[in-house]
Image (cartoon, helix red, strand yellow):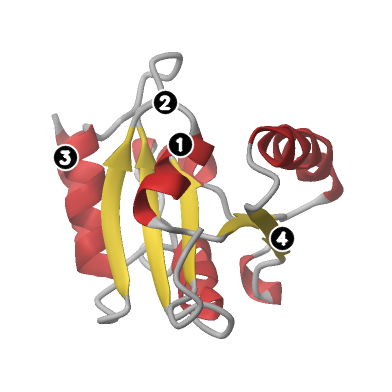
Amino acid sequence: MSPSSTRIAVYPGSFDPITRGHEDLVLRSLHFADRVIVAVAVNATKQPLFSLEERVALIRQAVTHPAVEVQSFDGLLVDFARRVGASVTVRGLRAVSDFEYEFQMALMNRNLAPELETVFLVPAFDLTYLSSSLVREVARYGGDVSQLVHPAVHQALKQKFRK
């Protein structure tokens, strides 16, 4: 999929919003990829808190490494991966409960694009419990999420729930 000289990984998700756990996985992906593309999914079945444009902007503020880029995509992940020349997809596993869904998705992607490998990463120990939905819920009720997200994301959450 990608030229042998450049290993490109795609890290897909809705990132509503990006958390410190996501940031951790993006940066750790650079241990085995030369470039990481954070692929922000358009998911018509979800009602996101942040618009697609807001999520892309927040990720760009939270992860500023020069080998990381942010793009949005709609449709099949394997088609996006082919377009950008990725050979690896990165997925995070926080708990056993994540495994069944992620395993099914990896097998389907392998069926659709046998050349695209899936790599599962576990988060840093202190971030294992963290999810975007949990951050949104805590922020909605005024809880302090400042240690769980980048300062720009924290500010954006405060503004969303101030309304």
Q: Is residue 30 left or right of residue 49?
A: right
Q: Secondary structure at mark 2?
A: loop
Determine whether label 4 and label 1 are within 8 Å by CB.
Answer: no
Task: Compare marks 2 and 4 and give the one earlier in the sequence.
Answer: 2
- Kindly identify which numbered label has been placed on residue 131: none
Q: Nearer the viewer, mark 3 or mark 1?
A: 1
Residue type of the residue flagged with mark 2: Gly
Label 4 – label 3 distance at C-alpha: 27 Å
Q: Residue at x 44, y 68 (%)?
A: 23
- Kindly identify which numbered label has been placed on residue 120: 4
The residue labelled by disc 1 is 79
Q: Nearer the viewer, mark 2 or mark 4?
A: 2
The residue labelled by disc 2 is 75
Percent across and percent down for residue 107 are 78, 38
The residue labelled by disc 3 is 53
Residue type of the residue flagged with mark 3: Glu
Residue type of the residue flagged with mark 4: Phe
Which of these two is toward me, 153 or 61?
61
Which of these two is toward me, 159 or 10?
10
